[in-house]
Every structure is written in structure tokens, then in C-alpha cells.
Image (cartoon, rainbow, N blue to C red):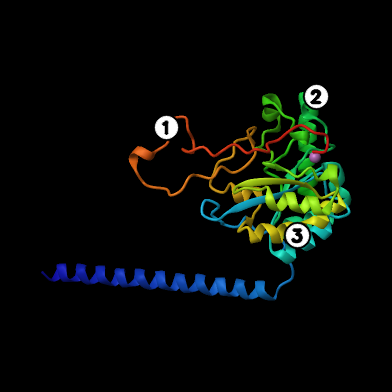
């Protein structure tokens, strides 16, 4: 009997030691976090870009503002606007101008915006050789990574022009748009603002060009107007969080699932239907026009 008592006592001691160790470990972790938090409050701008925010765009009404063909002379001012309003955007940039605005591109990433690839020199990729397509993408990846420390994971083909072969060569998800503001054509602050405020629908991707002064001038109004409509402005990656974007595929918006969601076995999607209920197609899908 005595030996059994000893075994039980030993077991109890081990259990208590285990708990103590766990508690101590927890305390260390908590203390560590506090110290990190304290440092962050005092500190200078972060040295590394913040990760995408965890915003559930199935519950929150999300929209993505995207800016093409930059960076340019107005991009820093656009970043000021976005910072003041606390919103994030996605920038599809041309490799050939990234280096001369490297500081702006770095700031973009550090302020939580998404840096993305819009080729080196804006050619129609469907007219290039495979080698030229790869070069357009790879040189731009390198330029953006050198400037910002971040390698893009998304690309947008110039003019929205792509095909299966280009998609395969690009090797990244190709992000098009659901709202084309045609800002490059009209160059009117009032019009750019009105289109950007009224046209987007939930899960929409809005196309602007930060190389035009009027476009950048319209953005304070656009942000206020979209927020009034109940939108949360997110990057493209934030909007598609939780969905696997496939390399080479094209995406024009984030399909919003019909609500309410009920957990019924009969409601599961049919084979071959990835998301169940398909959204209404957007009335303003990509078109090929020269300004994109
Ligand atoms: Ni473009």
C-alpha cells in the first residue's frame, strides 16, 4: 500500500510543478508583450510594414480603392489623405517609375497599403513574347521589393488585357476592377468623386490613377462619401482574406455570399460551385480602353 501512496504523491507533485511552469511561462509572455507594447507607443515609425488587418468582409461592407500607373508627383499627397482618414488602398505600380519615388513606395508599405505589380512599362502583355512578359513582371517585382522591402503578391495587367498564356506567365492572381472611374479621360474632380462615391457595390474594386492631380484631389470626398454609405475601405488582400486567390486567375470583385447563412446540409454548394450562391455580375466590368 505504501508504495501506491508514494506513486500518487509523486504524481501530484509533478502535476503541481507542471501548472506552476505553465503559469510562469504565461506571465513571461504577458510581460514580454507589455514591454513590446510600451516600446511601440514611444517609438518612431515602424521598420516593417504592418500585416493586413483582420476585417471580415463577409460581415462588414468592404470596398477597395486601387490606384494605377504610379507612383507619381501626387502620390505622397494621396498617402497624406489616406493617413488622415485612416484607410488603406492598393497601388498597382509601374516598375520604371518606382525607383525615382522609392521613398514614397516605402512609406506606402509602412502605412499598411498594398504594393502591387502593374508591369514595368505598361505594355499590352498579350502582344509580347513569353520572355518579355516575364521580364515585365520580374523587373517590377524587384524594383518594388527594393524600394519597400515587400514583394507584391498581386498584379494588374495594363488595359485589363490578358489571356490564359499571359496569366500562366505572370504566375500571380490578376486583379481587375468592378468600377472603372475613367478618371484619366475626364480629369474632373467633381465627376471623379461622384463616380467613386456612388458606383461601388459591396466587395467592389474601384480603379483610379494616382498620376492625375484631379484623381488625387477627388479622394478626400470619395473616402468621406463611401464611409457615409457604410463602407470600410480595405486593401485587395484584406478584402479577399480567407479566400485562396489562384495564380493566373482574374478577379474583378469579391463575391459576397447571400445572407443569412444557415448551416443546413442541403444548402451546401453543388460540386463545381466554389462559393455557393453567385453574385450578380457587375454592370461596369472591365473594358479595354487606353487609359488603364
Ligand atoms: Ni495602367
- Taking depth in this image into account, of 5 and 195 the one nearest to the observer is 195
- Taking depth in this image into account, of 122 and 51 the one nearest to the observer is 122
For marks 1 and 3, give the one nearer the viewer: 3
Mark 1–mark 3 distance (CA, rounded to whole Å): 43 Å
Labels 2 & 1 near each other (Cβ < 8 A): no
Q: Which residue carries the number 1 mark?
A: 270
Q: Which residue carries the number 3 mark?
A: 221
Mark 2–mark 1 distance (CA, rounded to whole Å): 38 Å
Residue 273 picture location, percent across and down: 47, 33
Q: Which residue carries the number 2 mark?
A: 127
Label 3 sits on a secondary structure element that is helix
Residue found farthest to the left: 1
Please tell me in which quadrant of the rendered image residue 109 appears. bottom right
* Residue 205 appears left or right of 119: left
Residue 187 picture location, percent across and down: 86, 48
Residue 45 in sight from this viewpoint: yes
| Residue 121 vertical position relative to residue 28 in the rendered view, above or below | above
Amino acid at each position: 500500500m505504501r508504495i501506491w501512496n508514494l506513486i500518487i504523491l509523486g504524481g501530484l507533485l509533478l502535476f503541481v510543478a507542471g501548472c506552476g511552469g505553465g503559469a510562469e511561462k504565461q506571465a513571461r509572455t504577458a510581460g514580454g508583450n507589455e514591454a513590446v507594447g510600451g516600446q511601440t507607443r514611444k517609438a518612431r515609425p515602424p521598420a516593417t510594414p504592418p500585416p493586413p488587418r483582420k476585417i471580415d468582409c463577409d460581415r462588414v461592407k468592404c470596398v477597395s480603392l486601387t490606384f494605377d500607373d504610379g507612383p507619381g508627383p501626387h502620390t505622397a499627397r494621396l498617402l497624406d489623405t489616406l493617413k488622415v482618414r485612416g484607410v488603406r488602398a492598393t497601388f498597382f505600380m509601374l516598375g520604371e517609375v518606382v525607383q525615382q519615388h522609392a521613398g514614397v513606395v516605402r512609406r506606402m508599405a509602412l502605412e499598411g497599403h498594398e504594393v502591387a505589380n502593374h508591369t514595368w512599362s505598361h505594355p499590352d502583355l498579350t502582344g509580347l513574347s513569353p520572355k518579355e512578359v516575364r521580364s515585365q513582371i520580374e523587373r517590377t517585382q524587384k524594383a518594388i521589393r527594393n524600394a519597400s522591402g515587400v514583394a507584391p503578391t498581386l498584379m494588374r495587367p495594363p488595359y485589363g488585357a490578358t489571356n490564359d498564356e499571359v496569366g500562366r506567365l505572370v504566375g500571380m492572381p490578376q486583379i481587375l476592377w468592378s468600377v472603372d472611374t475613367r478618371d484619366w479621360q475626364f480629369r474632373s474632380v467633381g465627376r471623379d468623386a461622384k463616380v467613386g462615391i456612388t458606383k461601388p457595390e459591396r466587395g467592389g474594386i474601384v480603379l483610379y490613377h494616382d498620376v492625375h492631380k484631379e484623381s488625387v484631389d477627388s479622394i478626400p470626398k470619395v473616402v468621406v462619401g463611401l464611409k457615409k454609405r457604410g463602407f470600410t475601405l480595405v486593401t485587395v488582400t484584406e478584402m479577399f482574406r480567407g479566400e485562396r486567390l489562384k495564380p493566373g486567375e482574374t478577379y474583378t470583385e469579391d463575391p459576397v455570399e447571400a445572407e443569412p447563412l444557415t448551416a443546413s446540409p442541403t444548402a451546401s454548394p453543388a460540386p463545381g460551385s466554389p462559393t455557393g450562391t453567385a453574385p450578380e455580375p457587375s454592370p461596369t466590368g472591365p473594358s479595354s480602353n487606353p487609359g488603364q
